[in-house]
Image (tube, coloured by chain):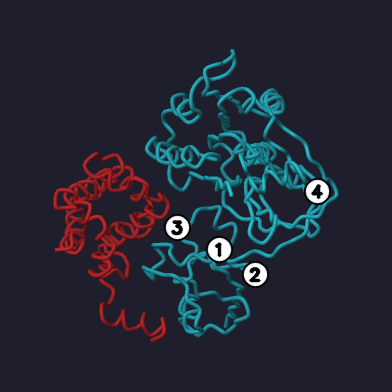
Amino acid sequence: MAKISYGPTSFVLADEQSVLEGLAGHGISVPFSCKAGVCQTCLMRATAGTPPTEAQNGLKVNLKQRNYFLACICHPKNDLTVALPDDVHDSVPAIVWKLELLNKEIMQVELESQTPIDYRAGQFINLVHDDVHVRSYSIASVPRLDKHLQLHVRRLPQGKVSGWIHDDLRIGQEVEIRGPAGDCFYTAGQPGQPLLLIGTGSGLAPLYGILRDALDQGHGGSIRLFHGSRDLHGLYLSDELRELERRHPQFIYTPCLSGAQVPAGFSQGRVHEAALSEIPNLKGWRVFLCGHPEMVKLTRKKAFLAGASLQDIYADAFNVSHA
Amino acid sequence: MTQKTLAQWYDETYGKTVDPALFDKLGGEAAVDAAVDIFYRKVLSDDRISHFFEGVDMEKQAAKQKAFLTLAFGGPHHYTGLDMRKGHAHLVERGLNDSHFDAVMENLAATMVELNVPDKLIAEAAAIAESTRKDVLGK
């Protein structure tokens, strides 16, 4: 008999009952549609306990790894603590460890979490400025390789939170973070699969983490990284990426400039167009897309039509907020 | 009425329209998984109908395509005619008609041909999909 806990509610699941039915019977309304494990409307996450594998049928591998499951077909044998995908995460305090401008507008913020957080490079955390202003930032660091959390924060015009980070944040200061969340990260298991990473602006942060995570885990298949910006000033970490290129022959870094001035060694044009013209057939590729939401949306479709399986396309579009 | 009793009422009223024999012969869930990318790619590349999919969330849409294929393959689902009507009403307002439904049926058949499904089973799946036409088109 499995015990199900959701927030302050907990109960023992009756035989034959699904987690969805159990929750509904206790007044907890979980959105559902097909009730057959197909439509994924009733997606939930186990925050303690492991959901049965049958309840994860058809989910992306990254969601499976993070204990997501479909409540309508979940008949657990062991106890589970469950949450809806957008339930609020606990806040943890973190100390600002280092602040470093990576280019004119992007600040690398290193944070030391005061309680250990279990994250993957490429996921995001929410940084809390005040009750109203919370922003999501992708994680560029790799837990095994880096001591602290690393975020790349681009200064937005009139950006309330990014302005605070660039102008007011001080080393040693305590901030509040929530998370991590997101399914845009590297998973081992297919070390020969070619990887395509496309990003614009500070969308390089998760890709830089994913790249180093993959290389560190011995990914031997081809890895292509296309980083786009309007001009040279928008690119960053180029030296580090060139160095990784020298050390890992399977990795190729292609900086792309969409503006008029394009020096030798850079690809001219928009980053997703450059990538797809070099690699027109994406059958069998795993694709990671980060950065400008319009670029991500368009490229997701183009990558799918170019042969990549939807299960193999990961994206973390920024929610660009100017408030 | 609580959600639980609503769900029970729903099951008792509509039952599960499934054809386990067909679903098994087609290869069950694995067959649906194999078909969904191929089918959705065909639909998105089809100029006759692709405009209906502009701006939709591709992951959510793929889950819906999977649900549709499960239904057509005789698999377990709980969709009713009313769901089909509600789900497509906004598209009918935008001009969804028989020609578009025909295009989807063509893509469905072509997907199964690509997966080497025998003609007889293609016809059976097509017949199930065809049975949703009136509801999808709000007739």
Circle 1: residue type: Asp
User: Looking at the image, which is closer to me, A220 or A313?
Assistant: A313
At which x and y percent is residue B115?
A: 29, 46
Q: Label 1 crowding class (10 Å Cα cut-off): few <14, some 14-19, many 20+?
A: few
Residue pictured at 39% horizontal, 62% vertical:
A39
User: Of label 1 and label 3, which has the lower sequence position?
Assistant: 3
Q: Which residue is mark 1?
A: A86
Q: Which residue is mark 4?
A: A96
A306 sits to left or right of A215: left
The residue under label 4 is which amino acid type? Val
Discs 3, 4: same chain: yes
Identify the secondary structure beneath mark 2.
strand
Q: Residue at x 22, y 49 (%)?
A: B104
**What color is chain A drawn in?**
cyan
Instruction: Return the chain for callout 2.
Output: A
Subunit under mark 3? A
